[in-house]
Structure formats: C-alpha cells, structure tokens
Image (spheres, grey):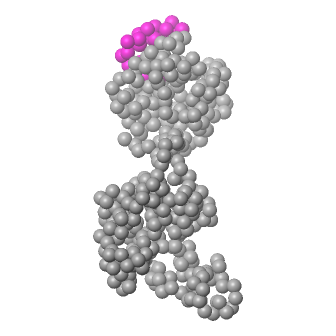
Amino acid sequence: MWLCKHFNAIRVSQETLLFKEALRQTEEAKAYKERNQKIPNALWANLIQERLSNVDCIKQGWILEGFPENQEQAWMLQSSGIFPRHVVMLYAPDTVLIERSGGKRLDPLTQEVFHTTFDWPSDPLVQLRLVKPEDFSEQEVSKKLLEYHRNFPEIFHIYQKVLKSINADQPCVDVLSQVLAFVQSRPRSAAPFTPRILFLGPPGSGKSLQAALIAQKYDVVNICCGQLLKEAVADNTKLGELVKPYIDSEYPVPDNLVLKLLTERLSALDCLSNGWVLSGFPRNVEQGEQLQKAQINPNRVFFFNLPYESIMERLAQRRTDPVTGERYHTTFRPAPTPEIQARLRQNPKDEEENIEKRLNIYYSNVKGLEDFYQDAFYVNADQDPYVIFEFIESCIIKPLPCKKH
C-alpha cells in the first residue's frame, strides 16, 4: 500500500480484483468464493491480465500483491505477456507471521488492511468499521504457510533474476526503505557504456587520486581543470595566451575561457571514444549550467565529503623538497633524513589562512551544486583510498536508480 502511494501506482491484489473492480469475469470468481471453492488459476490469470491492460495500469504502472502463488500461476502470467521487472519476497519466521496475523484488521469499505499493533488507523470512523478477516485463525495461517513453503522454490526459480528477498521482521520503515532501493534499481546492462564522470569536493578530499585510479583502470581520460589551464599556457596555444595573464597573477580565469578549453578537450576523439573523468570544474551552479548548455553532461557525479579537521591535517602539513620536487607530509610521510627535512618548503596555498578561504568558497557554493546534480553519489572521503575507489567503481558499473515519476 505504501509503495503504491509513493509511486502513485495501481495496487492489484486478489481482494481488489474481487471487490473493487468491474471486470468481465469478476462475478464468476465471486461465485467460487461464495461456494467456498478454490478459484481456478486460469480465472485468476484472466482477471489479472484484463486489469493490467486498463489505461491506469499502463500509464501509472502497477504493483501485483500476493500473486502468483504457485508455478502454474507464474507460467500463466508469462504466457499472457506479464513479466514484472522487480519481484520482492518478504520473509520472516513462521512464529512471527502467525503472531502478526492475529492482529490484522480489514476495512470492508476500502479493503485496506491494518494492524492492531503496527498500523492502526488514526481516523476514528475507520477504526469503528474494521473487522477481523476470515480464515485468519492460527490453524488456517499455519496451513497457508505450509502451502507457501511448498510452492515458493518453484516461483523463486522462475523469477530468480529479478527477485530480492527482504527480511520483514524489522520496523516497517526499514523494510520500505530496502524495497524502495530495490525497485528503483535497474538490472545491469551489457550495452556499451562511455563513462563521463565528474568529481566535486573540497580541496584535499582526494579527487585527484581517485581520478588517477579510475583513469588507470578504465582507460578513461583524466582531466583536471587547473592542469588543463596550465598545459594550455605551456603549449602557447591561442587560448593559452589569453589564460596566461590570469595564471601569472593568480586571478580566477574567466568562465568563458575555461569553458572553451574544456569543450575543446572533451570533444577530442580520445574523450569521445574512451570517456573522461573531470575534476576542478564546475565550482558553482552558474558554471554547471554553462557546462550543460555546452552539451557537456556527466553520467556519474560524485561529491567527496570530508571533515574540516581532516582537510586541514591533509593540506596544512604538506611540504615540498625544492631540490628533487618530492612531496612529503609531516605526519603521514615525513622526510627520511634531517638534511631533507631542513630544506622542505610549504606552498603558500597550503597555509591555514589560504586553505580556509578556499574552503569558504567551496562550502558557499556546494549546496547549489548538490541541488543541480540531484542524481549524484556521496563519498565518505575520510577512508582508505582503496575503500573509496571500490565504492566509486561500484557506482560507475551499476545503472543509475530509476527516477520517481
């Protein structure tokens, strides 16, 4: 029921088919019910096929509850062309299920199911008209569970590629969260996929390292915006000549120049054929919108999150050996000899005051970027680099979640 409300999908169950729908064979099915006879599988399949063919189910989608109950019903659904994309199997110990069944209550007006302990309605009028469903004695429930356990292995075999088992012996909110995560996922596709990856995060969050690891493993082009600007200056290109005064004076390069360089680089054959991983741009929503207008659309976006203290520890303690160019860290990678230690120098941008300025700029813009890239993944960057890499890799490989319509 909650899932139907979340997706605005149509709930289809045995109860709704018999009591809420006016289908061609509804009366025939009701007649079996009134005679306490089992409704034939073929009749159930016909009712479901007719209901799922209605316009509302086609437009809004549907959630089929409690069906199929056995292998024959599953085969009949398949022969009717009904193939669910996701099948959720909720399980719990039989003792828990028997205990729960005693508290079930039915609203005869809406056929909505409530529970005396877990899901009691707030409306007093609804409370008054609730009744205990028939066939919910402990003996009847035990009998149904026995039949279910006998039939489930065959159903599992049919739907195993699209089925997920979820433990229902936990709070409803947790169950719903797991079900939502599953039904919003897509099966992994074998279709060709060109990664267009964007890394966003504060300075010192490890974007450059992860970009290098991804580029090395997947042979995508690693593009750091700052490095791209410096290369353009070093190569004496026309754009590089325009960029050079800003680099030399340490002023921000205008967005239009950065965008021209990025568009030119990302349109190169290696980027188009192999894909790319970009870091250092955009830094705000306006730049993100400019990328979008230039048809530069990443298909995976990652935000790196790191505590302020960790950023300071990583950046403020960095040192460089001016003789060899080797980089050190006073805590994580100290100089091997006193001689090297004595000649180490700190880059002015790694002074605490300058780090704070850069962080303030980032944090003042990140909320807008998070709203702009709503399908982004969030990375806990305060972990081992290879743990972070495995998480990023899994997000690149698996399809994006389905959007809620």
Residue 286 rendering spot, x and y as whole percentages: 31, 65
Q: Which residues are magenta?
A: 13-37
The image shows residue 291, relative to residue 62, as above or below, that is below
Whether 135 is drawn above or below 210: the answer is: above
* Picture coordinates of residue 98, whole percent (x, y): 63, 28
Residue at position x 60%, y 92% in the image: 343
Q: If the image is split into quadrants, where does the N terminus sit?
A: top left
Residue at point 52%, 69% (across, down)? 208
| Residue 258 visible | yes
- Looking at the image, residue 64 sits to the left or right of residue 344; the answer is left
Total tally of numbered discs in the picture: 0
> Image quadrant of residue 318?
bottom right
Horizontal side of residue 97 vs 246, given as left or right: right
Q: Where's residue 154, x and y in %? A: 63, 24
Q: Main secondary structure of the magenta part?
A: helix
Residue at x 66%, y 29% (from the top left corner): 94
Q: Indicate whether 287 appears above or below 402.
A: below
Q: 118 or 351: which is nearer to us?
A: 351
Q: Does residue 97 show up magenta in the picture?
A: no
Residue 116 showing in the rendered view: no
Side (left or right) of 195 relative to 139: left
Does 33 appear in magenta?
yes
Q: Could you say where residue 359 lies in the image, as x and y percent from the top left?
A: 44, 75
Q: Quadrant of residue 110?
A: top left
Residue in front for this viewpoint, 120 or 381: 381
Q: Nearer the viewer, residue 154 or 34?
A: 154
